[in-house]
Amino acid sequence: VTIVENIITSNLPENFNDCRLKKKGLVKRVQAFLAQCDTVEGNIGQEMDKLQSKNLALAE
């Protein structure tokens, strides 16, 4: 999140239109990457829960 905030808060002069467009694209790509990370983190948590419940079942 800090990366996105740093990109957003960077000020570019008015005549740097190409850089502004690239900045917007970069922000979108970083946000998409962070969303993927959140999804993977959620999937890992689900798999860990499954493994823990299997371990508890085997212990009984």
Image (cartoon, rainbow, N blue to C red):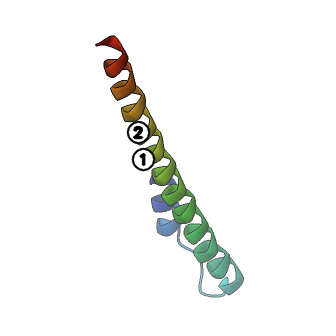
Q: Residue furthest top?
A: 59
Nearer the observer, 39 or 12: 39
- Give the residue number, with chain letter if any, for mark 1: 42
Dots 1, 2 in contact, CB < 8 A = yes
Residue at the outermost left position:
60
Image height of 58 relative to 41, above or below:
above
Q: Position of residue 19 (x, y in %)?
A: 68, 77
Give the residue displayed 55% in from the left and 64% down from the top: 32
Q: Residue 8 in the image: x percent, y percent?
A: 49, 68
Q: Residue at x 36, y 34 (%)?
A: 49
Residue 48 figure quarter:
top left
Q: Which residue is mark 2?
A: 45
Q: Secondary structure at mark 2?
A: helix
Q: Is residue 13 left or right of residue 37?
A: right
Q: Residue at x 63, y 74 (%)?
A: 25
* Residue found at x 47% / y 66%: 9
Q: In the rendered image, which quarter contains the N terminus?
A: bottom left
Binning the other alpha carbons within 10 Å of mark 2 as few (below 14), some (14 to 19) or many (20 upward) gives few
Type of amino acid at the residue the image marks with label 1: Gly
Which three-letter amino acid code belongs to the residue tagged 2?
Gly
In this rendering, position of residue 22 left or right of residue 47: right
